[in-house]
Image: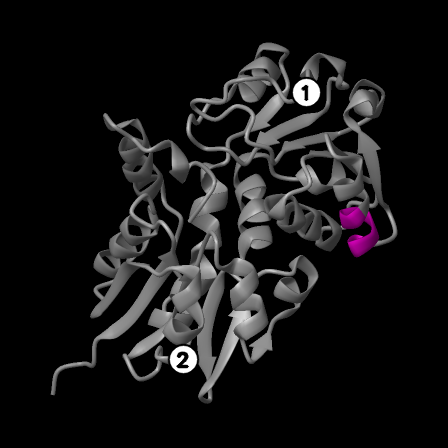
């Protein structure tokens, strides 16, 4: 008897830009697994009904992207620790018939730096630019890896304070005007804002003010070399692009749905880089699943 097809998905609105089907499709072929992974566009008003029908439609789980991550958090029957800390769900799976929600964005962020700049977590203090949803995952990962001094910088100070309160000891909120002073002794600079994306070119902070041992990373991956990363490398600092975060965050979900722990290989990275550089690449895919 043929093996039952294992099915998973990524759901969002819109979703046509998602590179997740390419990533998971590559792994399904690489490991010879009888499975499928599809992109599904679901409007917010239909999201709860979509989740209710997952098991009936044969899905083992899937990924959740904008604008459904908070709704998935609310609707999942159980949630893992990362999801609870971040307040959003990007991965769904079933355990004994119960729908679980998790968040692998922090894992993806940390695993990417592990690959590109090993030992990065010992390089605090950290300055995090931005206080949106992505910064939550970054701060969760920093705290998990033992970074004790995390400084959130945001144009709206109140939002930065909300995040600082959420994550507690060692996390502080600061106005943009304080950035230069905060960078003077920082070992990590992380951009989670949209500055640097195609169509929104700009420098979210000047790495000239960082110490010589500092590491700079940007979660934007279109373009791969953002103005911030280019400025950091020009200064001789270690810098890490954001593509690996996208690739590594996909690993835990694939393992849950398809039963194999996939590798983020140079071949996979080359494939996604080629897709990013292809003519007509869509700018709305730059920080999402």
Work out whether 80 lies above or below 270.
Answer: below
- The image quarter containing residue 89 is bottom right
Image x and y of residue 226, in percent: 50, 22
Q: Nearer the viewer, residue 231 or 119?
A: 231
Residue at image coords 61%, 48%: 133
- Whether 163 is among the magenta residues is yes
**Range shown magenta:** 162-167
Q: Which residue is mark 2?
A: 52
Q: Is residue 179 left or right of residue 141?
A: right
Q: Secondary structure at mark 1?
A: loop
Residue 7's label in the rendered image is none
Quadrant of the drawing holding the N terminus = bottom left
The mark found on residue 205 in the picture is 1
Query: Looking at the picture, how far across and down is residue 127, in whole percent?
Result: 75, 33
Residue drawn 62% across and 14% down? 236
Q: Position of residue 90 (x, y in %)?
A: 50, 60
Q: How is the image coloured?
A: one colour
Q: Earlier in the sequence, mark 2 or mark 1?
A: 2
The residue sitting at 58% across, 26% down in the picture is 239
Q: Position of residue 289 (x, y in %)?
A: 42, 49
- Report crowding for label 2: few under 14, some 14 to 19, many 20 or more residues within 10 A (C-alpha): few
């Amino acid at each position: 008897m043929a093996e039952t097809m294992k099915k998973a998905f990524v759901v969002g609105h819109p979703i046509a830009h998602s590179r997740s089907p390419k990533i998971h499709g590559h792994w399904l072929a690489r490991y010879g697994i009888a499975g499928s992974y599809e992109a599904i566009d679901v409007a917010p008003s239909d999201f709860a009904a979509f989740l209710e029908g997952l098991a009936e439609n044969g899905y083992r789980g899937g990924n959740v992207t904008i604008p459904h991550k908070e709704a998935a958090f609310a609707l999942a029957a159980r949630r893992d620790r990362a999801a609870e800390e971040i307040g959003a769900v990007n991965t769904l799976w079933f355990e004994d018939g119960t729908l679980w929600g998790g968040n692998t964005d922090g894992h993806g962020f940390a695993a990417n730096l592990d690959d590109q700049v090993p030992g990065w977590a010992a390089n605090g203090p950290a300055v995090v630019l931005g206080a949106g949803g992505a910064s939550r995952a970054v701060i969760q990962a920093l705290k998990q890896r033992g970074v004790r001094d995390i400084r959130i910088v945001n144009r709206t100070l109140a939002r930065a304070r909300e995040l600082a309160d959420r994550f507690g000891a060692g996390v502080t909120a600061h106005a943009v005007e304080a950035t230069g002073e905060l960078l003077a002794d920082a070992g990590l600079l992380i951009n989670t804002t949209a500055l640097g994306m195609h169509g929104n070119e700009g420098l979210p902070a000047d790495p000239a003010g960082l110490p010589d041992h500092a590491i700079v990373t940007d979660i934007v991956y279109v373009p791969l070399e953002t103005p911030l990363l280019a400025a950091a490398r020009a200064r001789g600092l270690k810098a890490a692009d954001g593509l690996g975060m996208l690739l590594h965050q996909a690993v835990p979900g694939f393992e849950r749905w398809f039963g194999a722990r996939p590798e983020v290989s140079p071949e996979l990275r080359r494939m996604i880089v080629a897709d990013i550089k292809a003519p007509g690449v869509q700018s709305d895919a730059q920080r999402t699943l």
